[in-house]
Amino acid sequence: MPAKKLLLEKLKEAADSVMPITVIVAALCLFFVPMQNDLMLSFILGSVMLIIGMGMFTLGAETSMTQMGSHVGSRLTKSRNLTLILVVSFILGCAITMAEPDLQVLARNVPDINTTVLILTVSAGVGVFLLLSMVRILFAVQLRWLLLGFYALVFILALLADRGFLAVAFDSGGVTTGPMTVPFIMAMGVGVASIRSDNRAQEDSFGLVGLCSIGPVLAVLVLGFIYHGASESTASSAVASYADTVALGHSYLEAMPDSLAEVGRALLPIVAFFLIFQVVSLHLQLVALKRILIGLLLTLFGLVLFLTGVNVGFSSLGFMLGSRLAEEQWRFLLVPLAALMGWFIINAEPAVHVLNKQVEQLSSGAISARAMGLSLSIGVAAAMALSMVRAVTGISIMWFMAPGYALALLLTLIVPKTFTAIAFDSGGVASGPLTAAFMLPFAMGAVTSLGGNVMTDAFGLVAMVAMMPLITVQIMGAIYMLRSRGRIRRKAEQSYGTADIIELWEV
């Protein structure tokens, strides 16, 4: 497909993703909840930048990150050098996570942890667990036992951890598996699994995203025992106001250099590592290398537009809308509106489309992208509604996470292993850019207006979104398993007529 046509297709996908949220928010602000004109105009301009940025970023990630992950994974495994595989996996896991836009958005919003400290901690967590994921694929370790063991460790630490770090830790696991990391990690997993010749190789290529989302949770929980930092102001709470349209335009232009520097610093380690790997080991042809480098440029500029639109337009309006809806006359709308936005917002996550397509391809159509999308929409809508219940009531996140993960882990013992791996991957990719960029500030605004604690009552929303698909996708797997058994039974019954029955007794 020509590059221009492919870019237009990605822009259309991005528009289809962002427009439902934009329309819902615009309708609320125009007909029900009064909002400042400059804030509304900033939001609309931010929506346009999100569409362009997400379209460019998705195309760039597909042509660069996916290819890089596949080439590196395949070449590493062919080397048969376990030490090299583990070291490179750790370095790549750290580097790719630093560039993740969802993590950048979350880190800016956390008031009590330094942004750089949080990003480095989370990146190290992903690096360690990507290393463990490679070990799992190479040695064919069953995913369910790793999940049971590591989540048991997560909840033991959660019982001892500082409550202020608890929700942020679970949120960190959700935001690290977004549109930057998912294509790379999944492609790397497929590349490593392709070296194995057994029947379970393809099945074991799933589960990397699910495992890698555990690392940041553990890393931030451990950080809570040793880190005592000064409080910082949250980005979303600093709601801007503009005297006129020129001032608004200048605010976007002034924010772009900061976003460019931030994204450049995040992408530089990945680019440097890949170029060194190319010279030392890969030796890709010039055409393939040029395509990857062009993809990286698209990724860079797409991320700059995306983060600028989020920081200037989206987060501010999300915070103010949540704050206004928490007022007495609108409070009844918080839960149903959050569920409605959750239903649509899952379609705005580029990583979800990547996962759904890969699931349909690798399952040979047995698990359709439509069925995956429906189960994810149900899960995310429920997660958003429960998050608003938390915001209003101040109930601890552990009352939701403990039984939710207990049910999800119990289902791993019942449903087919492929569905378990897909479910835990789905949980990681469901919580993406718009969840961190709009819904989290929305919850923060509501909690602030209600006089609650932002760290304990608002944070945790991303974690809820990451948890619910673990349950809904595995329930879909259980239904699929029961239907498959029913079809097999009916075929067996139809294959024998009454004339074929052999009587084993005499009359």
Image: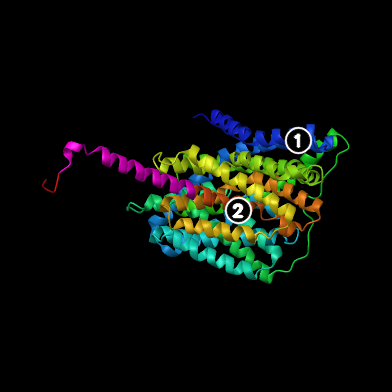
Q: Is residue 32 magenta?
A: no
Task: Report the residue at 60% width, 61% height from top.
Answer: 217
Relative to 211, is 442 above or below?
A: above
Residue 360 placement, left or right of 95: left
Could you say which quadrant of the image residue 350 lies in? Answer: top right
Q: Which residue is mark 2?
A: 174
Looking at the image, which is closer to me, 437 or 274? Answer: 437
**Left or right placement of residue 232 versus residue 296 in this view:** right
Chain-order first, disc 2 or disc 1: 1
Q: Which mark is residue 396?
A: none
| Range drawn in magenta | 474-502
* Spatial CA span between label 2 and label 1: 28 Å
Residue that numbered label 1 is attached to: 28
Residue type indicated by callout 2 = Gly
| Circle 1: element type | helix
Residue 206: % across, % down: 45, 51
